[in-house]
Amino acid sequence: MIAGALTIALGCVSLALVLTLYRLFKGPSAADRILALDTLVINVIALIVLLGILEETMVYFEAALLLAMVGFVGTVAYAKFLLRGDIVE
């Protein structure tokens, strides 16, 4: 039962990943692309967590946590660069 639910969830997250990649490449403005990149990181984190549940190992959860931290810092840096044109003042 859980394996079937995980398979469906992996399919849905993979579809969301593909749609987010489309928005990343097709986005009309830089702000849309930054938002798509942040959403892409969230989708990849969800994919990693689902794979960790499926394979019953803790390594995937640590990787998801590290990716979440790097993704947050990257999104803040991109947004700051977009607003000010400079990351470090």
Image (cartoon, helix red, strand yellow):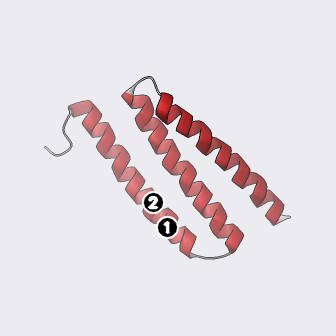
Position in image of residue 2 (x %, y %): 81, 65
What residue appears at the point 39 percent right and 30 percent down from the top-left corner? 31
Frontmost residue, 55 versus 89: 55
Q: Which mark is residue 67?
A: 2
The dot on residue 63 is 1
Q: SS class of the residue under badge 1?
A: helix
Q: Nearer the viewer, residue 68 or 28?
A: 28
Q: Is residue 44 left or right of residue 74?
A: right
* Vertical comparison of 49 with 55: above or below: above
Gap in angstroms between the C-alphas marked 2 and 1: 6 Å
Question: How crowded is the residue under tag 1: few (<14 C-alpha within 10 Å), some, or many (20+)?
Answer: some
In the rendering, at what x and y percent does residue 54 appear? 71, 68
Figure quadrant of the C terminus: top left
Q: Are marks 2 and 1 in contact (CB under 8 Å)?
A: yes
Mark identifier at residue 45: none
Three-letter code, disc 2: Leu
